[in-house]
Amino acid sequence: MPRQQRRKHPDENQFSALRRRTLKYWAQLPVIVRAIISGGLMATVGTVPWGLLAGLNLKHMPAVPWALIPAALFLWMFWRYARGDWWPRSTSEARRTSLRANSLPGEVWGTAMFAGVVGLVALVLMQRVMNRLVVLPQQEGGDLTKYPALTVALLVAMGSLVAGVVEEGSFRGYMQGPIERRHGPVIAIAVTGLLFGFAHFSHPEVTIVLLPYYAAVAAVYGAVAYFTNSIFPSMVLHAGGNMLGAIDLFARGQSEWQQASSSPSPLIWQTGADASFWISLVGFLLVGSAAVWAYAGLAAVARAADPVLE
């Protein structure tokens, strides 16, 4: 006798119909809109819990860095889900592809890190020039001397790790990747950089004048992700850059976008372009050119290691 099929409950039928309609409408959205929504949602879900945990830790039992344990557990769960694990299985492959967590051979790793570091040095020199052109906001580090140094150091390290993993997976993976495949890397990096900058408006000191800075940051990380088709090198660069920026902020009271100058300098519109400004400008152009050369070398090494990237 044929096996009797289970009859679906009316609510189950309605849920299936709603899911099909939702997927249909989602597929009809432009790729760039879907990428922005997906990447923005992943970034929000991945970073907000850490901000809450760190704030609670500094308020309650600051002598014990207890926030590290739930934060590490949440970050592990975020990573597993983002790379395609768990329910729903129908989206597993799409999530795995979107995260862009692809392994790389050693020679690509080394070249990617070199190109990224040169790009970050060029970014620092660019900010020296910007410091003489416009007044950049000053980031407040807060009075952390009242908290145990070990707690602060561990929270900074975890915050940098969260930023590297979540933001690179969200912006350079979920957001930049689909736009790249549809519209090319220039538009993808430009759109991602703009959204990356606006995402940092959650910090009270960030204003519209810092958008060029965040666009340049996105270009440094985004180009590495594009040429390698992996977020792993940019994750390391991002986490390391955030950690160094936090150390500089707490040690010298300078924000990450002002770390290149030891003291405020007058704008050239007030005093004229002096020797210091021209030296900074020439240095930026030279290192910026070196960064372009380094990224060209990265593209060649990545193509040689994986002809699919041609």
Image (cartoon, rainbow, N blue to C red):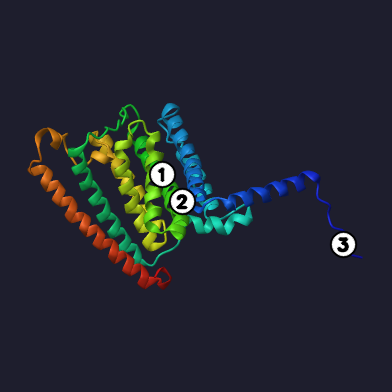
The mark nearer the N terminus, 1 or 2, is 2
Q: Nearer the viewer, residue 222 or 241?
A: 222
Q: Residue at x 22, y 36 (%)?
A: 134
Is residue 107 in view? no
Quadrant containing the N terminus in the rendered view: bottom right
Is residue 215 in view? yes
User: Horizontally, is 295 left or right of 46 in the view?
Assistant: left
User: Horizontally, is 258 left or right of 266 in the view?
Assistant: right
Three-letter amino acid code at the position of disc 2:
Met
Whole-number angstrom distance, CA of label 2 to CA of label 3: 46 Å
Discs 3, 1 touching: Cβ within 8 Å: no
User: Horizontally, is 52 left or right of 222 in the view?
Assistant: right
Q: Is residue 106 above or below residue 252?
A: below
Discs 1, 2 touching: Cβ within 8 Å: yes
Give SS at disc 2: helix
| x then y, percent, for residue 264 | 17, 34
Three-letter amino acid code at the position of disc 3:
Arg
Give SS at disc 3: loop
Q: Is residue 123 above or below residue 68?
A: below
| x then y, percent, for residue 52 | 47, 33
Corner quadrant of residue 116: bottom left
Corner quadrant of residue 243: top left
Few, some or many C-alpha atoms within 10 Å of disc 3 (few <14, some 14-19, many ≥20)?
Answer: few
Corner quadrant of residue 274: top left
Give the residue number, with chain letter if any, for mark 3. Answer: 3
Give SS at disc 1: helix
Give the residue number, with chain letter if any, for mark 2. Answer: 175
Q: Residue at x 29, y 42 (%)?
A: 245
Three-letter amino acid code at the position of disc 1:
Leu
The mark nearer the N terminus, 3 or 1, is 3
Quadrant containing the C terminus in the rendered view: bottom left
